[in-house]
Every structure is written in structure tokens, then in C-alpha cells.
Amino acid sequence: MRKTILVILFLSLLTIITTTHHHVLADSHFEGFDAEDDVVEDHDSFELTHLPITQSESPLTKTEDTQISPDTDPNPNPDPPIPKSASTTTSFDYWDEDEFEGIPTVDSQTPPLESPEITESATNNNHPPTPDDSKTKTTTTTPSSPEPQSGAVSKKQSFTIEIICGTFLVIFVINYFTGKKENENIALAWAAKFATKDAIFEKNFSLLGVGEGEDSPLLLKEGQNVFKFYASGRRYCQGLLATMELKSRHDLISRIYSLIVPCKDEISFEVYMNDDAMDHVVFALARKKLAKGMQKEVRDLQRFAGLVSPPSGRKWVDEQLGVVSESKEVAGDLITETVLDQIFGDKAFEKYGKGFISMHFSDQHPSTHRKMLLFKFALPDANNMPDMTRLVALIPYYIDLIGRYKLSSQARSKTEAARSKAAQEAYKELQNARQEASQRKKADRKKIEEADAKLSAEAIRKREAKERARQMKKAMPKVKMTRH
């Protein structure tokens, strides 16, 4: 009986201790929470029941909830519950902080821009690394690399421009000196072949070169590609001036242009004939296309001469050449058998006439000196100067031929009639020009008078006074003052 009473007392004490312990735990767990939190928590748990919960709650908390719910709410008028978005609930309530430690909290209103490295670390924490992930890592980290590459490319481009400009300048300077030397060599080669001792010009002229002494230079350099040679002291002429116009080899751009549009080195001779040593002669010989152009453009050929057809029954110039002359008689007398055999014949022209361009004889030349012989040839290379020996020999030959040439009476009458007609036309042109000039002066004077008529009397008086002062100043003697 005593044992039974002790067992009952022990069981009652045990039940009292357990009940008091449950109340203490409930009070300490829910201390400081309001009723609205319970409502919000229940609402959130209802909305997000489908999300997996990584850490389950103890059954003790559930029993405590059931014990607290019957209690009365201390705040009879609670504030309306604030709805929370699903993103904030999942980021704070249902995430395991130990597993996702280090991930920054994200605001629902202003989400920060995550760098590729942070996104990569977040994905690697949730999933084990796979080969695809390694590929994504390489693709996500590459956007930071273009900045130094673009800088390197710009530096390379800047250096490329500088290198190109420097190379062009170096090539330009080298080409300047080499081209200058080439032109000088061509001019000196020509002078050494035709203007030195026992050469053609030394045999036909008594004075060679641009100076008066024996040691005077043969050539005058007027530019990097222009050289001149002068000779005098021969019958029938006052002198000869040769002008070499070479390619602009010293200019790199001109050299490149000459590769696209080929041009030749040329030399032209101007022979100034004496007034009494040349009869009425207007004659030109050139290649057919050039001859037609000369007849249309050159003033004396346009006025006095025309194209001459090949005569029948005698030898004539090569078919590549065209003759422009005042009459057939002049053309036949100037194109002799000698020049046909030496240069202008069918067989000789192919071999010796490659450098021939044109020749033009006129006693009505439109320049300061009326009676002139003009020759124009193409210069060969410095090593091939003997190729133009026969062309240069034409100059003294035609000086003597024109100096001795006399027209027939019939041809002279025609040429004199043509020259008198040309003189009358020139006089009329001069008179017309004078009349036009006088008419312009009258028109200007009339405009001035009309302008004066519109001016007031005071303005006219001032202008007349100014004009008188100018006339008086002009009439005063000029006095030169010297300092002692």
C-alpha cells in the first residue's frame, strides 16, 4: 500500500515538472512577437508550400503554436498586414543561411547588376562543375579583355601611319637625288656627243656655250629637268638655242604619273635666221596626227599653209609623216633626195627616224623673231646618244638650204599676195581693237558724267578741288633730300 502511494506521488510530480517545462519553453520562444506576425507567417506558408524547405522545424514548435493560438491578442486593433513578395520571403525565410553563406541580399525594387564572376560563383555553389560550366566560364570572363586589345590595335595603327609617312619621305628624298643625277647625266651625255671638240656643233658654230670665255659652261641649268645650250657664229643665222625638257625624275609623284602616262625626254632647237637670208617660206613636217593639229592651231600654218598630198612620180616621205606647206613647190624643194635617203624615206625612217617629232620653218612666225627654224626631237638614253646623230645633222643642213633658197617668180607672186592680204587683215584687226578700246573709254567717260550729274553742287565742288590739288602735286618738282 505504501509502495502504491509512492508510485502515484512520483508520477504526479513528474507530470507537474513536464507541464511547467513546456510553458517556459513556449514563453521564451514566442517572446516579443505580435499576432500580426503569426498571420503573415501563415499567409506566406500558404503561398509558398510548393518550395522545398531545407531545414524542417521541430514538432515542439508546432505544439507550442497550438498552445498559443487560444490566447487573446494584446492589441485589439492591429495594423493591416504588410504583404511580402515571394522573392523576399524566399531570400530570407526559406533559404538555408549556412549553405548559401556569402550571397548578397537582393532588393526587389532595384536589383544590382551582377558581374559575370559573381554569377559564376553562385551557380557553382548550387551545382557541381561540369564540362559545359567550364565553357560558360570562359565565355563569361572574355568581355573584360577587349579593352587592352583595342588599345594595342590603336597603337599599332598609329605606328603604321608613322612608318608609312617616314618611308614615303625617305623614298622621296632618295628619288630626288637619283632623279636629279639621271637628268644631269642625260644632258651631259648629249653635250659630250654633239657640243664638244670635233662634234657637229663645234664644226658648224664658232661660239658654243652660255658664256663668252673659253672655259664657259656648255649647258645652262634652269631647273632640275630643264637645260639650255646656245651656239652662234654661223652664216645665214644669228644663233641657235637648244632647250632640253626632260622628265621630272626628281619628283616622285611625276615619276609615278609617267609610268601611267608615258612621256619622252625632248629637245627643241630654235634657229634665228637673218632677215635677208630667208625667203617666203612656211613649211612643217611631222607625224600625220601632229601635222593636222599644227595646221589647225599654229597661227602662221593656219593662215598660209595647208596639208600637201604626196606627188606622183617621185619619192616622198614615209606614210607616217604629214607635210604642211604654203605651196607644193616649197614642199618639193625642201624635201630633197638627201633627207629622204638619210631619214625621211620609207626604209630610213624606221631605223633613224624614231626620235623625230616635228620641224617647222616660217618667215611669219608669231613671236618676237619672225624668221625661225624650229626642230623638235626625242632624246634617247644617255648610253644611246649616237642614235640621234642624223637628226641633229638636219639642223646645219636646213640652215644652209633655207639660207640659199629662192622662190620662183610665180610662187613668189602668190606668197606676196597672201602676205599682203594677211597684212590687211591684221591691220583691220588692229583697227577694230583700237575702236573697241576707244568705245570702252567713251562708255566709261559717259558713265562718269552721268554719275556727276546725279551729284550735288557741293560734292562736285569738293571733287574738283581734290582733282586740282592732285594736279598741282603732280606738277610740283621733285626734291631729293640728302643727309650730310
Image: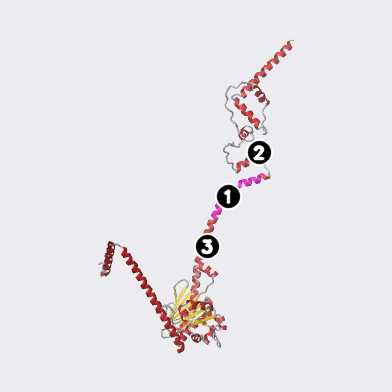
Residue carrying label 2: 126
Q: Residue at x 57, y 51 (%)?
A: 149
Residue lying furthest top? 1
**Of the pair 429 and 395, the residue shown nearer to us:** 429
**Residue 79 in magenta?**
no
Q: Secondary structure at mark 1?
A: helix
Residue 357 lies left or right of residue 40; in this view the side is left
Residue 169 drawn above or below residue 96:
below
Question: Where does the image place residue 477, in percent across and percent down from the top left?
Answer: 25, 70
Residue in view at x 32 percent, y 67 percent:
449
Q: What is the distance, in whole Å, between disc 2 and disc 1 at their CAs? A: 30 Å
Q: Horizontal placement of 205 versus 149: left or right? A: left
Give the distance between the C-alpha atoms of the residues marked 1 and 3, in whole angstroms.
Answer: 31 Å
* Residue sitting nearer the eye, 275 or 53: 275
Q: Which mark is residue 67?
A: none
Where in the figure is residue 159, as x and y percent of width and height? 53, 57
Q: Is residue 212 visible?
A: no
Judging by the rendered image, the residue that carries numbered circle 3 is 167
Question: Which residue is tagged 1?
Answer: 146
Magenta span covers which residues?
Answer: 133-155
Q: Nearer the viewer, mark 1 or mark 3?
A: 1
